[in-house]
Amino acid sequence: MEMADTPLSAVRDRIAGACRIARREQADVTLIAVSKTQPADAIERLLADGQRHFGENRVQEAQAKWPDLRARHPDVTLHLVGQLQSNKAEEAVRLFDCIHSLDRPSLVTALARAFDRAGRQLPCFVQVNIGEEPQKGGCAIADLPSLLAEARTAAIPLAGLMCVPPEGIEPAPFFAFLDKLARDNGLEGRSMGMSGDFETAIMLAATHVRVGTALFGARR
Ligand SMILES: *Cc1c(COP(=O)(O)O)cnc(C)c1O
């Protein structure tokens, strides 16, 4: 048996183990390395080991780091996993390949316009405030059907649903609920699971896990 000798190979092994238990194909789970606050050299180490999906949570920070990295690695897929202000939508659409934080009607409008201007369409996950926490991003569970309808009317390509469950309590019920919401709404993707809980998320049908600390160490 091969030893896990880097954090990346350890995380890949854990994903493979969770997929085996869940009787799922590993190819159906995309590992997004969340590189927010991490310098380019730390990102280059993962690129050298074959990692190709990365996540950032701020447009400005990504704008500073990624044009150079992308020039060297044109096959990277860059995911926006943080809140998006409507006035940054066009910049985001030019820089990222996938948006995980569509959470309100005004952003549907802004993204539709940005797609037109940039001449490209990005798959979007609708973020759901699954724990109904007042301070958290994501659309209210009750507003999900109308937001999805507006996104469909605006021809936004819908990749699926995304959530960040409340901290400090068992995440499984929240992942199971997001899975049900995705199924009820005919959506394929489930962006859920972070360093502390990605195996649980995979058991509950995650298609995209967003892992930072377990790959890069603590954020600075
Ligand atoms: C930072 C972040 C992650 C990664 O968190 P870790 O606990 O470091 O794995 C995942 N998703 C979102 C939305 C984040 O902001």
Image (spheres, helix red, strand yellow):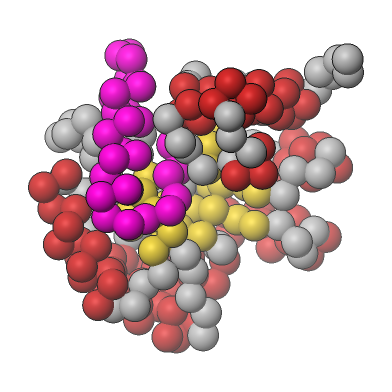
Please tell me how many numbered marks the rendered image carries. 0
Q: Residue at x 25, y 77 (%)?
A: 153
Above or below: residue 83 compared with residue 118: above
Q: Residue at x 35, y 31 (%)?
A: 175
In this view, which residue lies farthest toward the left? Answer: 142
Residue 144 placement (x, y as % from top left) = 19, 53
Above or below: residue 90 compared with residue 84: below
Q: Residue at x 48, y 26 (%)?
A: 203
The reply to whether residue 64 is in sight is no
The reply to whether residue 84 is in sight is yes
Q: Work out which quarter of the rendered image holds the N terminus and state it.
A: top right
What range is drawn magenta here? 165-193
Q: Is residue 168 left or right of residue 122?
A: left
Q: Is residue 2 left or right of residue 77?
A: right
Above or below: residue 149 compared with residue 210: below
Q: Residue at x 27, y 34 (%)?
A: 177
Residue 38 placement (x, y as % from top left) = 64, 37
Residue 113 placement (x, y as % from top left) = 35, 81
Residue 192 placement (x, y as % from top left) = 43, 36
Q: Is residue 105 left or right of residue 45?
A: left
In this view, which residue lies farthest toward the front? Answer: 23
Q: Work out which quarter of the rendered image holds the C terminus and state it.
A: top right
Please tell me in which quadrant of the rendered image residue 126 appears: bottom left
Membership of 185 in magenta stretch: yes
In this view, which residue lies farthest toward the right? Answer: 2
Membership of 176 in magenta stretch: yes
